[in-house]
Image (spheres, rainbow, N blue to C red):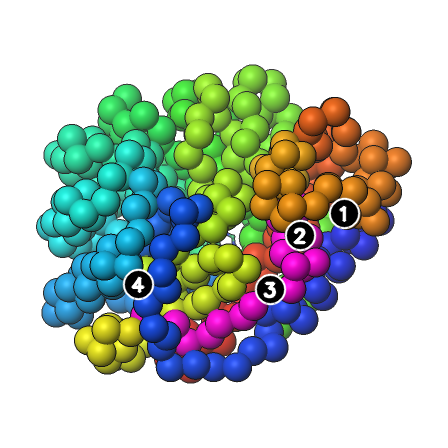
Amino acid sequence: MIEKIAENLVLNKTKEFLLNYNLIEGIKPINYSNNVDMLYVHIPFCRSLCPFCSFNRQLHDTKLEDLYFSLLEKEAQIYYNNGYKFNTMYIGGGTPTVNFDHLISFIEFIKDIYPIREISIESTYRELDEDKIDTLYKLGVNRISIGIQTFDKNLSKNIGRAWQNKEDALEIIKIANEKIKTLNIDLIFNFPSQTFEQFSTDLDILLENKVKQITAYPLMPSIYSQLFKNIDRKRERQFYNILIEKMYAYKYIPSTPWCFSRNNIELIDEYITKFDYYIGIGTSSISYINENFYINTFSIEKYARLINNNKLPAIMKKSIPIKSSMELFLLNKLFALGFKKDDFIRKYNKDVNELNYILYPLKLLGYVKDDKDRIILNKKAFYLLSSSMRAFLSVLDTLRERFRKMQY
Ligand SMILES: C[S@@+](CC[C@H](N)C(=O)[O-])C[C@H]1O[C@@H](n2cnc3c(N)ncnc32)[C@H](O)[C@@H]1O
Ligand code: SF4
């Protein structure tokens, strides 16, 4: 009940905020401000496209990739020319390793101009092998995140990943788990045809193989799809209970309600919860800086035109009112299991009591704990944050889907 109320509040607020916008045609470079350390890089190419996937992706095409990577370098260079000093890079997709040579020279280029200390890369096992993992390791990649979604043969087929093979996947997982500081495996739960047994077995396989980090996402369909209307929340909750029980039984440590690690590990998928501000480069990337939210174009043609005119390729800019920014901070930080009150004061120059209209009921219900200098999320509230974050990301996915279809 409380979960449903929270989810609907987040859904409606995010819809109001994200789905009302004016389109723009690029912006002038934004000067560096000293609180932006994180660079997200989007590489949209994949060998095949999975129907459930909510990200901006397109089929692997060598010619287009030649152009795309040269544009990415130019966009990174614009930020460099404007004083940026990123120290963390998250390369997401798509499947960034699908054009491995380009990826490697791009990472080298970024490392030459920025003091990068941490690199995280998304991939699938079929775009990795022992040599590639070794090359990434030597380049300083600290985290590889491999999407599996499920090891089950039939379910893989149902969700459009008939190419998956458990034995081949495990071979790559074992190599990466040994070599790379953090190997993360993504699973998804609550596909309509998925059974609790299938999900439970998927988790067991990862736990038996001592995978360092596991991220399990609830299925997040776009909010106007039939699938969204038909989300079975009761089933979602049951899947979530299986996840929590297994993670605690094996003493995995949560960093968010979806992400669990064998040891305390810093880098996670939801970097938006860790970094107050970030810059995204590449088509469809999101930047959030000083209460302004930007989305890059989804069209490679437009991307090329804007970048070649020395413009940043944003097609949407939204200024976030301070109250909404504080609410977003609260959602992100509670999702990251809590925050220091001082961090809120430093960011907003206001006391965290400003958020008492949300925090007070949460405290009364035992969902959060006020621990003098910190606000801590209690385990009881994990599912509440899971469904609220799903609502937030579903709206974001809806926006992505809209722009992807428009090719704007
Ligand atoms: C952008 S994908 C890249 C990973 C890689 N290309 C792959 O195929 O596994 C990152 C992760 O997002 C998650 N994801 C994609 N679409 C989703 C959706 N509709 N709902 C929930 N999770 C989703 C999947 O778990 C996936 O591994
Ligand atoms: S899940 Fe991965 S491989 Fe499938 S379409 Fe999305 S990004 Fe591409």
Q: Which residue is mark 3?
A: 320
Q: Which residue is mark 4?
A: 282
Image coordinates of residue 27 in percent, x first then y, are: 37, 74
Label 4 and label 1: CA atoms lie apart by: 35 Å
Label 3: element kind: loop
Q: Which residue is mark 2?
A: 326
Q: Is residue 240 above or below residue 314?
A: above
Q: Amino acid at mark 4?
A: Gly
Query: Which of pointers 4 and 1 indicates the residue nearer the eye?
Result: 1
Query: Which of pointers 4 and 2 indicates the residue nearer the eye?
Result: 2
Q: How many marks?
A: 4
Tell me the residue at 17%/35% (across/down): 139
Which residues, given as a range, are shown in magenta? 312-332
The answer to which of 31 and 93 lies nearer the viewer is 31
Q: Amino acid at mark 1?
A: Leu
Label 1 and label 3: CA atoms lie apart by: 16 Å
Q: Which residue is mark 1?
A: 355
Q: Earlier in the sequence, mark 4 or mark 3?
A: 4
